[in-house]
Image: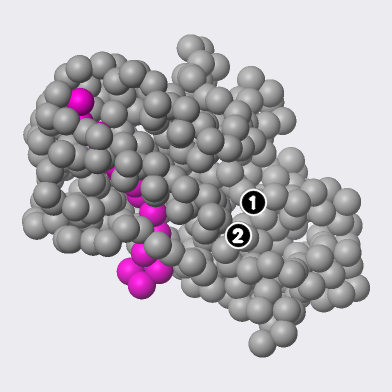
Amino acid sequence: MDRAERARTAFRRQADFCDAMDAPKTAAIARGLADVLDRDTQVGRVVLDWSGDPIADALPLRLVGGLHALHRAGAAVGFDRDIDRLRAALVEHEAALLPWLDGPPQTNEPGRSAALMTGLLHLAERYGPRFELLELGSSAGLNLLIDRYRFDLGGVAVGPQSPVLIRPEWRGNPPPEAAVEVVSVRGVDVAPIDLTDPAAADRLAAYVWIDATERQARLDRAIAMVRDRGVRLDRGDAAEWLDVRLAEPQPAGVTRVVLHSVVWQYLGSERQARIRDAIHAAGARATAERPFGWVMLEPNRDLAAHEVRVRGWPGGQGMEVVAHAHAHGAWVDGLAVPEVASDYVLSGVAPV
């Protein structure tokens, strides 16, 4: 398969994933781009000559995000399924679209906190309520508000009263009914988004699929929360940052937990291995007085869904899948019996 066909295939796979996620307008744009991209425009040449893996690099969502930003600004770019309008937009708005191809999307989705909190409830049942949270790939820091959101997870209520209530459709077994007290929460991102900058907030909103009006409203409320009180979000390399954080003293009676959601595929194999080794080393040092955990929400390409994976130390359970979830938090399916899993490894996943 040559580069051009590989790129077109990536757009069609993204369209299929959007269909599965109940996003027909976004699916139509992705599928339309697979048909209309050509080398008559610079945008088309960049996409069709893409030297990397267009799926792992989230290439379709880079361009779809740029088109959505134009749509939000009032331009007609084909979200009404007008293929001729889509083709014309690649010419008329070429200068505006090209920068969107320069880096991966940062889709900071508050709804994913429901899956992360589900994992924390499983650890709270084992080790007690108090947590110190370290998030990798925090983007704009919206999941760092996990201690300020209110959750309803299959009837299990967690968190304070909040402007943001996260209540996914719950399928399957509810999570453990355990108390959660977040002592501290801190995150890192290689290019954190400053939500006090209106342009940055608009860019983040452009990565929300046009079909997801409820997600957009929740995002707006979460952005307001960050602007009101801020979050602890550092700029840096995730592996280097984690090494420093894990070397810091851990309070007795507090479980230290590494969190991440839909970030693993962007880290690269070398950084993944370094982070995995650091987490395993921290787990080996864990004690009953100072437990350690790992909670993630990451894609399973075979399920066209995401897995909530949990591991805690000390303990003999190993890595477990405790739930499956929608990519953007629309639903969570709790498993009656956790599934034993190996360390998380994924390549070539359809981006979300």
Disc 1 secondary structure class: loop
Residue 14, image x, y percentages: 55, 68
Residue at coordinates 75% horizontally, 51% vertically from top-left? 102
As rendered, which of 276 and 79 lies closer to the eye?
276
Tell whether position 171 is magenta: no
Q: From this viewpoint, which residue is outermost toward the top?
A: 229
Left or right for 138, reference 292: right
Q: Amino acid at mark 2?
A: Ala
Verify CB contact (< 8 Å) between mark 2 and mark 1.
yes
The answer to whether 317 is drawn above or below residue 159 in the figure is below
Residue at numbered disc 2: 58
For the magenta stretch, what is the residue range? 290-304
> What's under tag 1, amino acid-wise?
Pro
Left or right: where does residue 195 sit relative to residue 322?
right
Is there any visible trace of residue 29 in the rendered image? no
**Of 180 and 256, the residue lying toward us:** 256
Q: Residue 104's mark?
A: 1
